[in-house]
Amino acid sequence: MYTTLLTHNDNGIFTITINRPEKLNALNGQVIAELEAVMHEVYTNPSIKSVLLTGAGEKSFVAGADISEFIGAGSAGGKTLARRGQDLFFKIENCPKVVIACVNGFALGGGCELAMACHFRLASENAKFGQPEVNLGIMPGYGGTQRLVQLIGKGRALELMLTGGMIDASAAFASGLVNHVVVPDQLLTKAKEIATLIQSKAPVAVAKCIEAANAVYNEALNGYETELNAFSACFDTTDMVEGTTAFLEKRKPVFTGK
Ligand code: COA
């Protein structure tokens, strides 16, 4: 069904692998279109409970937008590219099911931006992060200027963006860009462990946590008001009744997502 993505559903954990290893999984128009389609699948398929996003091969998560498609775009073309990338990454960021980036090598430019649009990130020891767009005479355009500042602070973010350099996995961990650093062959195992734990929680409560956390960075919303509404919506769920009753009855809850 997809030509540039591999997908696999293992007990609700849906792994999406960007599969252009010969181009270090660079995001060309085809990959972007298929990521749009796969996110529609994630939103609408109830058998998908959580998502892991990674890159094929041992070298790269995603080495950026496909530079060969930039030539001759002009400012209007640049705006179209950025708008499409931003819209796709908003879809990932606002996904009600958890999306975890498993960064298995280079996460550069659009690749770093893609990882940052995910809810959190795990990295293998060989991962490298950067926003090298200034080396090409451009700048991050898929939300990177905003999310990098949000995640690691303005000073560190601007140093990375302005120098066009890279940081390794341990520096990414120290700056809060990634939550865990593991040996390469443990990357998906560790991510699956975390996804399994999250899948055992009430799905509406998980979705509402994501919605409220995202509201922090949305100037159109009042985060506390969003939290209030999200909190109260949980009280309308049967999972809330199940969770609280199970606690009082000293048993494990069985959540249904309702
Ligand atoms: N767009 C298009 N093609 C890319 C790419 C990108 N962002 N990143 C890598 N590739 C391609 C290379 O052109 C090369 O293709 P070829 O074999 O047909 O020549 C292939 O992927 C392998 O990359 P290569 O540069 O030979 O690997 P390397 O190990 O020497 O270097 C990088 C790895 C990541 C340091 C280097 O590929 C790089 O700097 N990539 C661009 C990163 C970037 O600027 N991203 C932001 C884009 S906005």
Image (tube, rainbow, N blue to C red):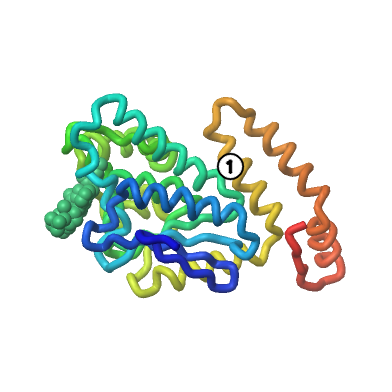
In the image, taking residue 212 as reference, residue 2 lies left or right, namely left
Q: Position of residue 227 (x, y in %)?
A: 69, 38
Please tell me in which quadrant of the rendered image residue 156 appears: top left
Q: Residues within 10 Å of mark 1 (few under 14, many from 20)?
A: some
| Location of residue 201 with respect to 250 vertically, above or below | above
> Can residue 176 be seen in the rendering of this structure?
no
> Can residue 60 be seen in the rendering of this structure?
yes
Number of numbered callouts drawn = 1
**Quadrant holding the N terminus:** bottom left
Q: Position of residue 132 (x, y in %)?
A: 22, 42
| Location of residue 113 with respect to 20 vertically, above or below | above
Q: Residue at x 65, y 53 (%)?
A: 206
Viewer-proximal residue among 149 and 118: 118
Viewer-proximal residue among 79 and 208: 79
Which residue in the protein does label 1 denote?
Answer: 213
In the image, taking residue 131 as reference, residue 202 lies left or right, namely right
In the image, taking residue 26 as reference, residue 117 lies left or right, namely right
Q: Position of residue 100 (x, y in %)?
A: 48, 57
In this view, which residue lies farthest toward the front? 1
Q: Residue at x 34, y 28 (%)?
A: 79
**Quadrant holding the C terminus:** bottom right
**What secondary structure is marked by label 1?**
helix
Q: Residue at x 24, y 41 (%)?
A: 69
Queried on whether the Cβ of the residue with tag 1 lies below 8 angstroms from ligand 1, the answer reads no
Q: Amino acid at mark 1?
A: Ala
